Amino acid sequence: MVFDHIGLKTETRQPDETWVESSRVWVTKPEEHPFRVEWLRYAPDSPITGPVREQPHIAFRVDDIAAASQGLDVLLEPFAVGAGVRVGFYLNTDGVVVEFMDELASPPADGE
């Protein structure tokens, strides 16, 4: 498990935001922030609700989301976010929202 970023909700437009239609949220690139902060600005009609929307989260890159999330409550099942990355959101036993990120398996090449 490797730390990737901290996600923080904002209502203020941020420089270089990217729109994510499926979740109806504007996001920034944490790799471009000096402290690895990802700013999230939700549209009023975003389908994201509950702790994922209301609380900060901490994100880790893992080899396998299923293994890393064992014993945690599922907030958002894993889904593809582009660039071959999949994420899932979980609630730790102490109430912390955790995002796990892994790489999507590549489909087998023709003939394999």
Image: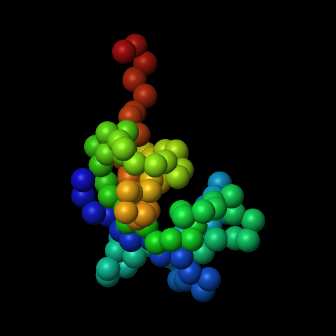
The colour style of the image is rainbow
User: Residue reaching furthest right?
Assistant: 45
Name the residue located 40 percent from the left edge and 23 percent from the top edge. 109
Q: Where is residue 65 in the image (x, y as percent from the top left)?
A: 37, 43
Q: Quadrant of residue 97?
A: bottom left
- The mark total stands at 0
Name the residue located 38 percent from the left edge and 57 percent from the top edge. 93
Q: Quadrant of residue 33?
A: bottom left
Quarter of the C terminus within the rendering = top left
User: Residue reaching furthest left?
Assistant: 1
Give the left or right position of residue 24, taking residue 17 as reference: right
Q: Position of residue 34 (x, y in %)?
A: 32, 81
Q: Where is residue 101 in the image (x, y as percent from the top left)?
A: 38, 51
Q: Nearer the viewer, residue 9 or 72?
A: 72
Name the residue located 27 percent from the left edge and 63 percent from the top edge. 3
Residue 27 visible? The answer is yes
Give the left or right position of residue 33, taking residue 28 as reference: left
Give the left or right position of residue 51, taking residue 98 as reference: right
Name the residue located 53 percent from the left edge and 83 percent from the top edge. 15
Residue 40 visible? The answer is no
User: Residue reaching furthest top?
Assistant: 111
User: Residue reaching furthest bottom?
Assistant: 12
Q: Which of 14 and 76 is in front in this view?
A: 76
Residue 105 higher or lower than 42, as above or below: above
